[in-house]
Amino acid sequence: MSNSKKKRLAILASHPIEYQGPFFKKIASNSEIDLVVYYCWDFGVGVEQWDPGFGKKIKWDIPLLDGYTFKFLKNISWRKASSHFFGEINPSVCVEVFKNNYDAILVIGWSSFSAWLLILAAIIKRTPFFLRGENPLSQEFKKNMFKRYLKVIILRFLFLFASSLLYIGEENRKFYKYYGVPDKKLFFVPYAVDNERFISEARELISKKDSLKESIGISKEKVVILFAGKFIYKKRPMDLLRAYKNTPLENKALVFVGDGELHNEMKRYVVENELKDVHFVGFQNQLEIGKYYAMADIFALPSGAGETWGLVVNEAMCFGLPIIVSDVVGCGADLVHHGENGYIFPLGDVEELCQRLSSLVTNEKVRNQFGKSSRDIISKYSFTEDIIGLNNAINPTAVGGKIYS
């Protein structure tokens, strides 16, 4: 941006989460952006709160509100949640739009009442607004025809008014194109984690790989397969257990980081099938999860529809791990280059998942090659790239993006 004056950017987000807090701090540190973040509610900060996916109370252990200006808006919803449209009702968001002269407003997601309130206020005041969602095109066609037709009408209308659409990856770009968004309104702001922190942890912890394995009862000779996430149906952890059972190798171990409604079923399957070296270590917060990536040799995410990206894959790649994902996982098109840093298998094909696991468990050289490629690929999906994309979208002289006069 050539203009020396900072651009005033507001962001509307649902609530503080472990991936966005560091991202907002990075934006605020940029010399060209003056940032304020509006939150619809305070889930996950201050006190432990119930997370239905993990099936337990959680509180993130990294600072999510440091380094940037933020404001919690009063949420008058009778059922506060981010999982349904009326879970976030914040009328004061309109006041914030009208009383402040923002150069642009970024709305993260559009599936809440408050998001639509802000969008309406921005249109009335003629303030440019950007949209950033996770939707991959590959999962759009799994909806019924009526919902798809209705969605086409609504989203084409919404995207027409948006100044810019910030796409997180290739499938997300295709999604916007499917709904008629021209290239000039599309800006690449990749889905990223705090690469600097994770890579720094990797440098420190990987040298301790053997002792980390032994700390949870795994011998250092075993090749560790890692799963991290909620034990829920869309993540399909049972597919990984079945593939592990069918992998005819002794030098393997499987570590599950997380918790959720399938926990008892998974443990029962392990006992009934007398599976060896399967370890459940529970939910691990951000400052603890690094040691599990460091002890791992392979990362697997067999998720189905609803896994719009899978940021745990980003984290695993910062630790130089080969990756195996299903062909429905949203990040696959960007982060998993089949045969280069991992494998993509057909959703639910336990037999092929088993074969891919076996090929990596038995070949240390390939694991090392894939791991190096993972580190190279993930370097292009960072907060640095995000800032470049944001600056391009905010800059009224950039190619793309309608700026109201």
Image (tube, rainbow, N blue to C red):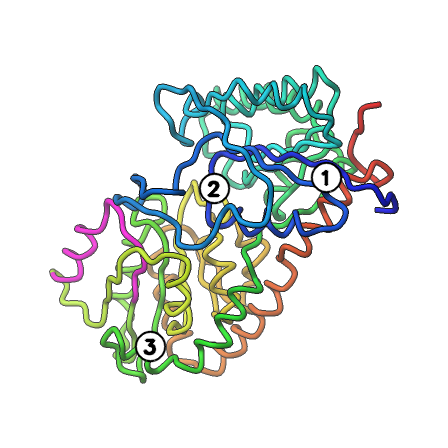
Task: Relative to 119, say whether 274 is above or below.
Answer: below
Q: Nearer the viewer, residue 167 or 52?
A: 52
Q: Residues within 10 Å of mark 1 (few under 14, many from 20)?
A: many
Q: Which residue is mark 2?
A: 16
Q: Residues within 10 Å of mark 2 (few under 14, many from 20)?
A: many
**Relative to 381, 13 lies left or right:** left
Label 2 vs 1, first from the N-terminus = 2
Q: Amino acid at mark 3?
A: Leu
Residue in the picture at 46% in, 34% down: 142
Q: Which residue is mark 3?
A: 212
Residue 268 x %, y % = 14, 55
**CB-based contact (under 8 Å), mark 3 and mark 2:** no
Q: Nearer the viewer, residue 301 or 285?
A: 285
Q: Amino acid at mark 1?
A: Leu
Marks 2/1: CA distance? 26 Å
**Foreground: disc 3 or disc 2:** 2
**Relative to 331, 252 lies left or right:** left
Q: Amino acid at mark 2?
A: Pro
